[in-house]
Image (tube, rainbow, N blue to C red):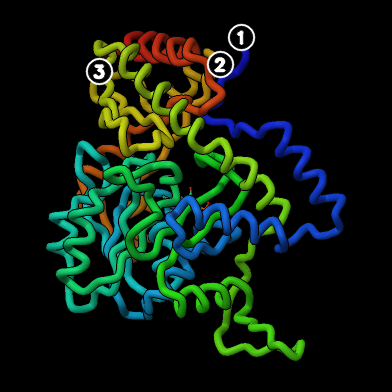
């Protein structure tokens, strides 16, 4: 039986041919494809300005600059995410202030988030884990009342929505990833969605060395920008993927539904929130009943691998990494993030999977866990 990875991008032949055309064109870095990709993204995000980036990490770094986050400022975020979320705050010289996640949604607990606001708080940086959106009504109500910027780490949210509106089509600054594992990909890449013309101009400059091209062919530089521009090769992949976004999201939702139908309740695993309207089902993460198993997560992953099934870990609670411990974090600080981060496994979920692949994964999970029962 073929090995089933936990995810795999679906790149169609038209896109592959399109990339070959870009290669032959003689213009392979930022150019017409990036412009087209940005236009298509902007259309999807309800006409808001969009800047394509080489990663969502770059988009988040620029968003922090655009929002005016400075050394000494605090940015409130979740300890349960890919470590990029907090690293970018440190790299801006600011302090990530972690707030524990909700046990059910696995997203930042908004009540605790509001309680963590201090006079030094400059921005809120929530994450939509696995593409399940943070409650945008409550989030923006808090931000408005407290006068704070929001930087949505919507890296995993492409295709997700809130009350019928696509994530990215409203709100403050929204960073989205097109990394290879995301719901649409450009191999590596991302974008920042903005709403203000002056901030969009600043974002454009921060994306590429701060350079402004003058009508007389000269250049001017007022800000020290970085190097975050997307290549046309990557943008051409993204253009091909945009056409499939709706179908990909629908397929992911169907596969997620099947997991709920087929999952063996006796396995003792804790399933994610069964939400099929807003969530784009970027991942299907279950929590292992480790306290009832003789073996650990590593052995579970190994046993699944032996059955030809790839399993990922997204993510260990990041406040327990050495970097964040040295800044004062310790075990016990964020019990839900630690519980979830310590027991989560990501099961295969990607659009090209067959329905029967879900059945095969569910059967293997039961077999491995029941075989490892204490
Ligand atoms: C929640 C979250 N934030 C940020 C990122 C960074 O995205 P990129 O790899 O495009 O820089 C990721 C990517 O995995 C992510 O999942």
Residue 226 in the figure: left or right of residue 344: right
**What's the mark number on residue 308?**
2
Per the model, the C-alpha gap separating discs 3 and 1 is 27 Å
Q: Residue tagged by mark 3?
A: 268
What secondary structure is marked by label 2? loop
Per the model, the C-alpha gap separating discs 2 and 3 is 22 Å
Q: Residue tagged by mark 1?
A: 1
Q: Position of residue 206 (x, y in %)?
A: 55, 75
What secondary structure is marked by label 1? loop
From what the image shows, is residue 160 above or below residue 6?
Answer: below
Circle nearer the viewer, 1 or 2 = 1
Q: Position of residue 327 (x, y in %)?
A: 33, 66
Per the model, the C-alpha gap separating discs 1 and 2 is 7 Å
Q: Quadrant of residue 256?
A: top left
The N terminus lies in quadrant: top right
- Label 2 crowd (10 A; few <14 / some 14-19 / many >=20): some
The answer to whether mark 3 and mark 1 are in CB contact below 8 A is: no
Residue 10 in the figure: left or right of residue 147: right
The residue under the point 58% across, 58% down is 38
- Label 3 crowd (10 A; few <14 / some 14-19 / many >=20): some
Q: Quadrant of residue 98?
A: bottom left
Residue 84, can we see it? no
From what the image shows, is residue 210 above or below residue 38?
Answer: below
The answer to whether mark 1 and mark 2 are in CB contact below 8 A is: yes
The residue under the point 28% across, 14% down is 267
The residue under the point 29% across, 19% down is 293
What secondary structure is marked by label 3? loop
The residue under the point 71% across, 39% down is 15
Q: Position of residue 276 (x, y in %)?
A: 31, 30
């Amino acid at each position: 039986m073929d090995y089933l990875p936990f995810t795999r991008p679906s790149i169609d032949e038209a896109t592959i041919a399109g990339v070959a055309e870009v290669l032959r064109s003689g213009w392979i870095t930022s150019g017409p494809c990036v412009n087209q990709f940005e236009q298509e993204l902007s259309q999807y995000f309800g006409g808001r300005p969009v800047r394509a980036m080489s990663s969502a990490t770059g988009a988040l770094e620029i968003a922090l600059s655009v929002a005016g986050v400075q050394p000494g400022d605090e940015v409130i975020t979740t300890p349960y995410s890919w470590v990029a979320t907090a690293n970018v705050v440190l790299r801006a010289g600011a302090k990530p202030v972690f707030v524990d996640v909700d046990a059910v949604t696995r997203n930042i607990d908004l009540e605790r988030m509001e309680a963590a606001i201090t006079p030094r708080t400059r921005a809120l940086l929530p994450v939509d884990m696995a593409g399940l959106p943070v409650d945008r009504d409550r989030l923006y109500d808090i931000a408005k009342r407290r006068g704070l910027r929001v930087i949505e780490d919507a890296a995993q949210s492409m295709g997700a929505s809130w009350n019928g509106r696509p994530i990215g089509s409203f709100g403050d600054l929204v960073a989205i990833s097109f990394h290879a594992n995301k719901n649409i990909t450009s191999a590596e890449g991302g974008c920042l969605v903005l709403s203000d013309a002056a901030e969009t101009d600043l974002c454009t400059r921060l994306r590429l060395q701060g350079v402004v091209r003058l009508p007389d062919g000269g250049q001017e530089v007022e800000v020290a920008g970085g190097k975050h521009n997307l290549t046309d090769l990557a943008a051409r992949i993204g253009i091909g993927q945009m056409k499939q976004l709706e179908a990909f999201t629908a397929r992911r939702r169907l596969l997620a539904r099947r997991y709920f139908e087929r999952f063996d309740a006796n396995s003792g695993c804790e399933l994610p929130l069964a939400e099929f309207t807003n969530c784009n089902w970027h991942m299907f993460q279950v929590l292992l009943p480790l306290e009832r198993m003789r073996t650990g997560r590593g052995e579970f992953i190994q046993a699944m691998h032996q059955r030809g099934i790839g399993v990922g870990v997204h993510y260990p609670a990041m406040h327990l990494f050495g970097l964040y411990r040295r800044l004062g974090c310790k075990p016990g600080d964020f019990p839900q993030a630690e519980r979830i981060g310590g027991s989560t496994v990501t099961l295969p979920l990607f659009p090209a999977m067959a329905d029967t692949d879900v059945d095969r994964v569910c059967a293997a999970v039961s077999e491995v866990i029941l075989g490892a029962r204490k």
